[in-house]
Every structure is written in structure tokens, then in C-alpha cells.
Amino acid sequence: MHYNQIHFTNRSSAQLYKNYMSTATALVKRLALEQRQDILCEINSHIFEALQQQFPQQLIQDTTPMQLEDILEKLGLPATFILEMISSASLGQAVAPSTEPASLLKMPIMLARAIVNLVYYTTYTLMLIAIFLVVAKFVDPQGVGFFYAPNKFFIFGKLILQHEEAIRYEQLGNYFIPVLLFIITGLYYSSTLILKIKKSIYHKL
């Protein structure tokens, strides 16, 4: 497809962007070539404009995965965004083939792929947060942990204000980092499994 791809220095950011645009490309592949290009260019432009609003031009390529994830979540799932674009542009003729039985049968597959993408992005984000907390625990051992007291507070992460009362109720102690490493491992294998599911769904489209 002919659109100016956005380049990122961070490999994870580049992969998130590629996954999003690949999903959009798969969803519009039954449309006419010109209409496919218009929709993909529009989606790409929305992403780039959102980046421009948050970062100077020269820093866009350094966008982190979490920053890009936030932008893509605000933009919405590719399927939802594309349907809104088609409706607003009155592309009734372009989507007419989707009323054919073969196309209708593929709608659940496309919906499943959109859901799998959402689960993948969520899993990836949680894994990044867990990695951040491991690093934060080394930097601030007392201010990071699992703080719990019935009917008082429930905090898994970093205390914004280090109250002595909260610190006394830290539950995991030296087990905090091992627990996080266990969570990170589980999220990693989960994301790997989700990627395999995504590939199998892609081959069905």
C-alpha cells in the first residue's frame, strides 16, 4: 500500500505500529485499490498527527511503546475506526461485497483478530509495567511493593507519598521481585501464544 510509513528507532514501537497497520490492511483488502489506499493513508495520518501533537517532529521516531500504545488505544481498534471512516465517507458501494455470504462468514474471523490484538497489546503493556516495577524496586526498595491493609489501602506498585504506616503493611518483602519475575515470564509466554493465534487467524482471512 502506498502510504508514508512512520519509522521508529525502538523495535517494540515499530512492531506495534506494524501490527496495527497490518490489521487495518487485512480488514480493507476486499475494497477497491484506491479506497484501500485512501483508508490506510487516513489511518496513518491520524497516527502521525497524534504523535505530532505530543512530540516535536524530530522526536517522533523515539516514541516509546507505552506512548504509542496510548495513542493507538485512543484511536481505537482498526475494525471500529475503519467502519466509522466508511460510514462517514458514504462508501456504500465499497462495502457492498461484504454482504456476500463468503464475506459474512469472514466477519467473525476479523472480529476475533481485533479482539486478539487488543489482548496482545494489553498483555504487552502489563509486561512493560512489571519490568518497570522490578527496576523501581531496586531504586526505591521501601517505596515499591505490595501494600495492603483491610479497609485502608491496596497498592501494588510505587507509593506516591511514602507514609510510614503504608510501608509497615508491605506484604511481599523480598518476594516482591521473584513474584514480578514470575508474572513477567507468564506474560511473555502468553504474548508468544497470542502471536501464534494471530498468525493462524491471519491465514484464515
Image: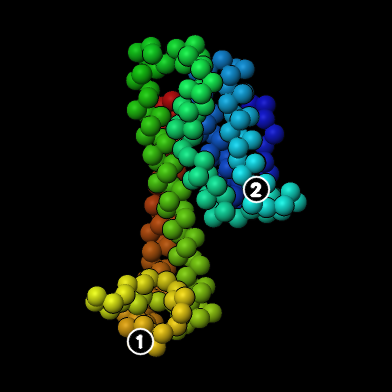
* Left or right side of 104 for 117: right
Q: Residue at x 45, y 65 (%)?
A: 130
Q: Is residue 200 visible?
A: no
Q: Is residue 64 above or below residue 112?
A: below
Instruction: Name the residue carrying label 1.
Output: 165
Q: Residue at x 68, y 52 (%)?
A: 55
Other-residue count near label 2 (Cα within 10 Å), few / some / many at <14 / 14–19 / ≥20: few
Return the mark for residue 53.
2
Between residue 53 and residue 59, name the one nearer to us: 53
Element assignment for label 1 = helix
Percent position (x, y) of residue 184? 42, 62
Return the mark for residue 127.
none
Quadrant location of the N terminus?
A: top right
Q: Residue at x 34, y 28 (%)?
A: 108
Percent position (x, y) of residue 139? 54, 79
Q: Is residue 137 above or below residue 35?
A: below
